[in-house]
C-alpha cells in the first residue's frame, strides 16, 4: 500500500498533539505523586523546594511556556495541567499558574524578538517564573510606589520591597514593575533571586496555600541591566494596548483553574471518604447525602462550564496577539471576571460543606486554601465590573481587574 503523503502542516499538527497528550500524562503522574503526601507537606508548611524539584524533574516549567516552534504549550492545555496539579496540591498548582502567566511577560511587555529569545532560554534552562506586576490603575490593596528604579551607568538600580505570592525563594526569574525616578515611567523588569542586594523574606504560618512559597522580596540597589527590562507598563487603562491588557485577566483566569482544582480535589476526597467510611450504611442508601453530593457536584460542574468558556475566549484573544482590538480585550476580561465570581463562590461553598460530610485529618486544607486564594478578590468587585461592562458596553479592558 502506498503511504498517504503527509504535508508539513499535518505533521506539525500530529507532533503538537503528541506533545499535548504526553504533557497531560506527565501532569497526571505528578499529581498522583503530590497527592500521596499532600497532607504532610501542608502541615509542614515549608518553602516549595522539594515541590519545585519534582516539577523540574518532570519538565513542567519548560513545557509550560508560551507556544512556539517545537516548544511551549497552548493556553487551554496549560490550564488543564494547572487544574490537574491543583486538585492534588493547590499550592503547587498556584506556583505553576503564576509561572505560566509570567512566562508570557515578554509577549505582554517586550518586543517579539526579545520575547522569543527569553522564552527559548526559559525552556533551555528550565526556569521557574514568579512575580508581582501591579495593574496600571489605583487599587485599594496598594499604597503608592513601593519599588523605585534609579539610573546607573550600566542600566538601573532597583530598591524597595514587594509581596510575592509564590516561589519567592525557589524561582529562577521574578517579574516586577517599578517606577523610574528619572521620568516616572513604570518599567517591567525581571531579576534572578540570587542577585546582589536582593533579600527574600518567606511568609510563615499562612492560613492556607502554605507550600506556595509566598513572601517578600527586599531590594537594595539591585542592578538591572537593559536586557532585564521587558518594557513599559502603561500608567492607566486608556493607554494600555489591548494585548498588554490581557496580562491581568490571564493571571486571574489561571488562578480560577487553581480554584476549580481545589473544589474538585475536595469533592473527590470527601466522596472517597464517604464511600469507605460508612460500613453500616452505603452512601447510596442515604438520600440526604445523595442530595448534598448532587448539589455540590452541580456547583463544580457549573463553575467548570463558565471557566472553560472564559478559557476558550482568552485563548482566542491571545492567539490574535497585536491584532487584538480593545473590544475583544474587554469582552475577554469581562468573561474572566464572571468565571472568577462563579469559581470563588463554588470553591468556598464546596470546601466548607465537605467538612460536614466527612471527618478526616487534612480535609480542612481545601477550605483554607480556597479562602486564601480568594481573599484578595472580593466577589462584589467582580460583579460590579461585570455589570459595568454589560450596561455600558465598555471597550476598555478594565472590568476584570478592579
Image (tube, grey):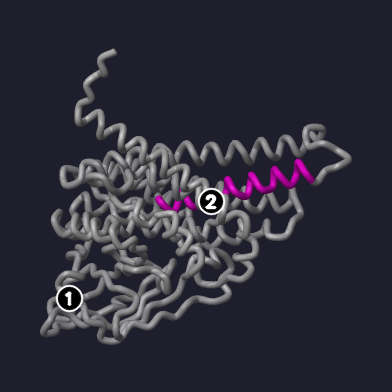
What residue do we see at 43% from left, 49% from top? 383
Q: Quadrant of the C terminus?
A: bottom left
Find disc 2 in the rendering and name its residue: 31
Mark 1 vs mark 2: which is more N-terminal?
2
Q: Is residue 91 above or below residue 15?
A: below
Q: Residue furthest left?
A: 153
Q: Main secondary structure of the magenta part?
A: helix
Q: Residue furthest front?
A: 1
Total numbered badges shown on the rendered structure: 2
In percent of width and height, residue 266 lies at: 62, 50
Disc 1/disc 2 C-alpha distance (Å): 38 Å
| Position of residue 273 in the picture relative to residue 280 (left or right) | left
**Neighbour tally class for label 2: few under 14, some 14-19, many 20 plus, Cα within 10 Å:** many
**Mark 2 falls on what kind of element?**
helix
| Position of residue 92 in the picture relative to residue 266 (left or right) | left
Quarter occupied by residue 166: bottom left
In percent of width and height, residue 14 lies at: 31, 32
Residue 225: mark in rendering: 1
In magenta, the rendered stretch is: 254-276
Q: Is residue 113 above or below residue 322?
A: below
Amino acid at each position: 500500500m502506498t503511504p498517504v503523503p503527509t504535508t508539513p502542516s499535518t505533521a506539525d499538527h500530529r507532533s503538537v498533539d503528541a506533545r499535548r497528550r504526553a504533557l497531560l500524562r506527565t501532569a497526571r503522574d505528578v499529581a498522583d505523586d503530590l497527592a500521596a503526601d499532600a497532607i504532610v507537606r501542608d502541615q509542614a508548611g515549608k518553602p516549595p523546594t522539594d515541590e519545585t524539584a519534582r516539577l523540574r524533574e518532570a519538565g513542567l516549567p519548560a513545557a509550560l511556556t508560551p507556544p512556539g516552534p517545537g516548544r511551549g504549550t497552548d493556553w487551554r492545555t496549560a490550564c488543564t495541567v494547572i487544574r490537574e496539579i491543583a486538585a492534588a496540591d493547590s499550592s503547587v498548582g498556584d506556583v505553576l499558574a503564576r509561572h505560566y502567566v509570567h512566562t508570557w511577560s515578554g509577549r505582554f511587555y517586550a518586543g517579539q524578538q526579545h520575547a522569543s529569545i527569553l522564552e527559548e532560554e526559559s525552556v533551555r534552562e528550565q526556569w521557574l517564573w514568579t512575580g508581582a506586576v501591579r495593574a496600571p490603575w489605583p487599587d485599594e490593596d496598594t499604597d503608592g510606589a513601593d519599588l523605585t528604579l534609579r539610573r546607573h551607568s550600566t542600566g538601573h538600580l532597583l530598591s524597595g520591597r514587594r509581596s510575592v505570592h509564590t516561589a519567592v525563594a525557589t524561582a529562577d526569574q521574578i517579574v516586577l514593575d517599578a517606577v523610574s525616578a528619572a521620568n516616572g515611567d513604570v518599567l517591567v523588569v525581571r531579576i534572578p533571586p540570587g542577585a546582589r542586594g536582593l533579600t527574600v523574606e518567606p511568609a510563615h504560618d499562612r492560613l492556607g496555600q502554605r507550600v506556595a512559597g509566598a513572601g517578600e522580596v527586599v531590594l537594595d540597589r539591585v542592578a538591572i541591566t537593559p536586557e532585564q527590562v521587558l518594557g513599559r507598563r502603561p500608567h492607566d487603562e486608556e493607554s494600555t494596548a489591548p494585548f498588554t491588557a490581557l496580562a491581568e485577566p490571564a493571571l486571574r483566569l489561571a488562578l480560577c483553574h487553581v480554584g476549580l482544582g481545589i473544589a474538585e480535589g475536595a469533592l473527590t476526597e470527601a466522596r472517597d471518604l464517604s464511600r469507605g467510611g460508612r460500613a453500616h450504611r452505603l452512601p447510596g442508601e442515604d438520600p440526604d447525602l445523595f442530595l448534598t453530593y448532587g448539589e455540590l457536584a452541580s456547583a463544580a460542574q457549573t463553575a467548570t462550564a463558565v471557566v472553560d468558556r472564559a478559557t476558550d475566549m482568552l485563548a482566542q484573544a491571545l492567539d490574535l496577539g497585536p491584532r487584538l482590538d480593545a473590544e475583544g480585550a474587554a469582552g475577554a476580561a469581562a468573561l474572566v471576571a464572571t468565571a472568577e465570581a462563579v469559581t470563588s463562590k463554588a470553591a468556598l461553598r464546596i470546601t466548607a460543606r465537605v467538612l460536614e460530610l466527612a471527618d478526616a485529618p487534612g480535609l480542612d486544607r481545601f477550605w483554607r486554601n480556597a479562602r486564601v486564594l480568594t481573599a484578595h478578590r472580593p466577589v462584589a468587585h467582580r460583579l460590579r465590573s461585570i455589570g459595568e461592562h454589560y450596561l455600558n458596553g465598555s471597550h476598555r479592558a478594565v472590568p476584570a481587574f478592579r
